């Protein structure tokens, strides 16, 4: 039976299959049908040259805010995908139990791009706006209902991958670490992982945020340059991080507007503490910089010395595992028919972190095309076709 689409002559990077070299990849009925050299293109509905491009499983951005028009913080998932080549956006807590149905019906089910969600333990989700509108969603115990959160996870289970809680002075106020413990309890009942945002300032202290996490739970903003630093005063990666990694806690970049510092990251990667997942935390206050999207965040890690296959693993295979969606993040035959075409530009590029520090780098990733559910996604075509 002919293929629906064949990408020919690309350089495949797929850590799940140990692939890092030239091959074709073919799609049929919305899935990957075959991968290998010299695939038969006869009768195929669409044949596209991927020559000069890296071809990866569709990129997954594990930390985004895409409840567009439903929450003030969110941006349009399709705009994010066009810019970055990501085929899956995972929204992290924009919606809580009170508006998860709205997110599902008005955004998730209408989106060409795949969207999954961490349900916020806070019933209203994140209702802060941009800039000066800081409205803490988790400092009022009345908002933090375990039964409502668990019910929302169960009602929307096919779209939900976990529970989100933002912990720190500006979101949990005087409640300290208690909201995190409530989120973990909800996660135990609903049998899903918890993603915790490390707030800029205590309370609670970073140990109180990381120590309670279970294997499979996720720390986002893991290279925060703020007061609640992952580094000791002497510049060492804190024991709480090392112990958490040892027991299987996942560390996610979550760049965002205020949560990623080159200096912190550099000190940590010098000690071997690379991220498990690279994500953007794209939202209204960082989509035009400093975060932009996951591709820019990936470029920053490439320039910090992370090998390309590991950068790809951190945006495909690992987030898919964290989400318990093994059909994503891989180009193995039978898996979801999503792929991203990338090139690396060489030159002199200027990167900015969340506190305004500048790093110059000699590489930049750019997307050159997107395959969604086995078809070339024209909306994702690169603006410049040179
Ligand atoms: Zn976020």
Image (cartoon, rainbow, N blue to C red):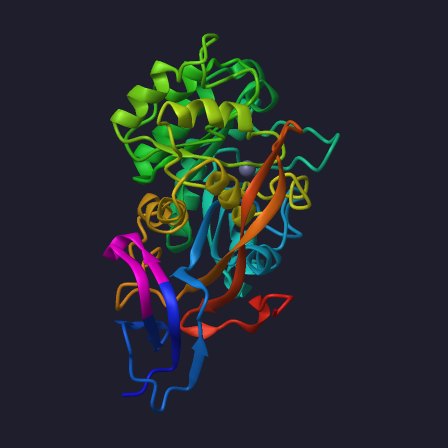
Quarter-wise, where is residue 8 in the image? bottom left
Residue at x 42% of width, y 24% of height: 268
**Viewer-side residue, 136 vs 323:** 323
- Viewer-proximal residue among 51 and 253: 51
Q: Residue furthest right?
A: 132
Q: Position of residue 286 (x, y in %)?
A: 65, 40
- Identify the image quadrant of the C terminus: bottom right
Residue 5 picture location, percent across and down: 40, 79
Horizontal side of 383 relative to 31 (left or right) equals right
Q: Nearer the viewer, residue 118 or 27?
A: 27
**Residue 340 quadrant:** bottom left
Q: What's drawn in magenta, residue-wise?
A: 12-23
Q: Position of residue 354 (x, y in %)?
A: 62, 31
Residue at the image point whose x is 29% and y is 79% from the top: 39
Q: Residue at x 39, y 50 (%)?
A: 312
Q: Where is 38 relative to 325, above or below?
A: below
């Amino acid at each position: 039976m002919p293929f629906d689409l064949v990408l020919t002559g690309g350089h495949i990077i797929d850590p799940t299959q140990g692939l890092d070299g030239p091959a074709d990849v073919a799609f049929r009925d919305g899935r990957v049908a075959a991968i290998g050299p010299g695939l038969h293109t006869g009768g195929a509905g669409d044949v596209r040259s991927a020559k000069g491009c890296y071809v990866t499983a569709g990129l997954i951005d594990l930390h985004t805010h895409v409840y567009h028009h439903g929450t003030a913080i969110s941006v349009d998932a399709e705009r994010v995908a066009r810019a970055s080549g990501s085929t899956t956006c995972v929204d992290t807590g924009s919606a809580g139990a009170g508006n998860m149905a709205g997110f599902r019906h008005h955004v998730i089910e209408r989106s060409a791009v795949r969207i999954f969600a961490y349900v916020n333990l806070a019933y209203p989700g994140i209702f802060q706006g941009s800039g000066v509108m800081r409205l803490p969603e988790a400092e009022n115990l009345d908002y933090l209902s375990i039964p409502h959160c668990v019910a929302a996870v169960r009602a929307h289970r096919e779209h939900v991958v976990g529970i989100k809680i933002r912990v720190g002075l500006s979101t949990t106020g005087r409640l300290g670490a208690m909201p995190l413990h409530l989120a973990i309890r909800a996660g135990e009942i609903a049998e899903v992982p918890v993603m915790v945002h490390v707030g800029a300032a205590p309370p609670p202290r970073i140990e109180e945020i990381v120590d309670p996490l279970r294997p499979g739970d996720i720390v986002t903003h893991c290279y925060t340059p703020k007061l609640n630093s992952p580094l000791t005063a002497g510049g060492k990666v804190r024991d709480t991080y090392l112990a958490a990694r040892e027991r299987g806690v996942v560390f996610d970049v979550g760049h965002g507007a205020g949560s990623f510092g080159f200096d912190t990251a550099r000190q940590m990667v010098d000690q071997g503490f690379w991220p498990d997942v690279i994500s953007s935390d794209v939202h209204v206050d960082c989509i035009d910089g400093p975060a932009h999207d996951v591709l820019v965040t990936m470029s920053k890690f490439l320039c910090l010395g992370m090998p390309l296959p590991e950068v790809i693993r951190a945006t495909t295979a690992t987030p898919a595992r964290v989400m318990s969606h093994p059909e994503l993040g891989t180009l193995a035959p039978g898996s979801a028919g999503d792929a991203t075409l990338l090139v690396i530009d060489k030159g002199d590029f200027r990167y900015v972190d969340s506190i305004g520090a500048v790093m110059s780098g000699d590489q930049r990733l750019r997307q050159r095309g997107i395959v969604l559910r086995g078809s070339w996604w024209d909306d994702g075509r690169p603006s410049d076709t040179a």
